[in-house]
């Protein structure tokens, strides 16, 4: 029991720890003459001192190009993971909640993201129990890149022979080509429709194909095609 103050406010403190469970609180009051009021139902309280098991993001899709670099050109992803059975799981992209799912009876869950902006996305899954105790997973860092690389450029070739260094006529049948492209992109070099070599641009975007292979006499139209790390 507790005594109310002059304003009618009172505080009741449990003398013994309460076990985990659901408690329906009822209240009665007794005035100084000993008259007792009818019972009034209060709030229902849930005590749950056991935190959720740490959830795990077990997989994501769809990846593109290199399956290990966590870079993709898809802007809608599916995340899958595990948590306690029937647990509420909030999906976070950094500090932004992008959705909520409920784990099934075996603890498995899946979530499809909204359309994601280009850039880094540190995803976490947060398990939330009925006492609002929250436990977060380790982050899954994924980069979305939907922008195709700029067209690469062939800046020079060698060896150019003869009197003029600008007429693009040479007696060298195995040429070296150099150029620029998006940093770290894969550059395929074609002679007409024939692939003559593949190289990777460096961190500054420079690339060099040191040998085209022996070329037949005649006109050769070289082009370069770049594919970035997202594919």
Image: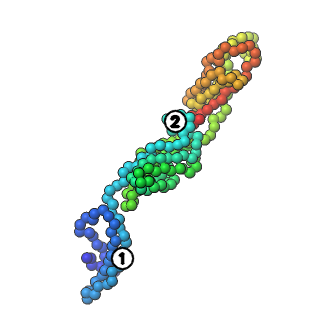
Asked which colour scheme the image uses, the reply is rainbow
Q: Residue furthest front?
A: 105
Q: Earlier in the sequence, mark 2 or mark 1?
A: 1
Check disc 1 and report the residue beneath it: 41
Provide residue 37's location: percent of width, then percent of height. Answer: 32, 84
Q: In terms of depth relative to the viewer, which is nearer, 60 or 70?
A: 60
Circles 2 and 1 in contact, beta carbons < 8 Å = no
Mark 1 lies on a secondary structure that is: strand
The residue at the point 28 percent across, 63 percent down is: 19
Question: Which residue is denoted by mark 2 in the rendering?
Answer: 67
Residue furthest to the bottom: 33
Instruction: Categorize mark 1 by other alpha carbons within 10 Å: few (<14), some (14-19), many (20+).
Output: few
Q: Quadrant of residue 225?
A: top right
Point out the image quarter for the C terminus: top right
Q: Residue at x 48, y 55 (%)?
A: 100
Q: What is the quadrant of the N terminus in the image? A: bottom left
Instruction: Give the camera-side residue of 88 and 31.
Output: 88
Label 2 CA crowd tier, 10 Å (few <14, some 14–19, many 20+): few
- On the picture, is 230 further left or further right than 195? left
Q: Which labelled disc corresponds to residue 167?
A: none
- Rendered residue at 58%/45% (across/down): 75
- In the displayed structure image, the side of residue 32 where residue 107 appears, left or right: right
Calculate the distance from the C-alpha at mark 2 to the C-alpha at mark 1: 58 Å
Which residue is the extreme one toward the left? 15
Residue 191 visible in the current orientation: yes
Residue 104: x and y in percent read: 44, 53
Res. 154 in view: no
Total numbered labels placed on residues in the image? 2
Q: Nearer the viewer, residue 11 or 93?
A: 93
Horizontal and vertical percent for residue 153?
67, 28
């Amino acid at each position: 029991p507790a005594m109310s103050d002059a304003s009618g406010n009172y505080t009741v403190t449990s003398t013994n720890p309460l076990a985990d469970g659901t408690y329906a609180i009822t209240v009665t009051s007794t005035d100084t003459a000993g008259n007792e009021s009818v019972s009034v139902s209060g709030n229902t309280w849930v005590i749950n001192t056991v935190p959720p098991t740490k959830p795990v993001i077990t997989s994501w899709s769809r990846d593109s190009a290199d399956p290990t670099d966590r870079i993709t050109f898809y802007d809608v992803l599916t995340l899958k993971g595990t948590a306690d059975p029937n647990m509420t799981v909030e999906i976070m992209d950094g500090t932004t909640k992008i959705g909520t799912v409920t784990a099934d009876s075996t603890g498995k869950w899946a979530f499809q993201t909204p359309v994601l902006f280009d850039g880094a996305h540190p995803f976490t899954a947060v398990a939330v129990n009925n006492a609002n105790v929250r436990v977060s997973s380790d982050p899954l860092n994924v980069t979305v890149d939907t922008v195709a690389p700029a067209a690469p450029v062939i800046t020079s070739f060698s060896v150019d022979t003869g009197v003029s260094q600008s007429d693009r006529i040479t007696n060298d049948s195995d040429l070296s080509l150099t150029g620029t492209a998006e940093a770290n992109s894969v550059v395929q070099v074609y002679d007409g429709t024939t692939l003559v070599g593949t190289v990777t641009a460096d961190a500054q975007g420079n690339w060099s194909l040191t040998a085209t292979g022996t070329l037949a006499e005649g006109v050769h139209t070289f082009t370069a095609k770049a594919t970035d790390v997202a594919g």
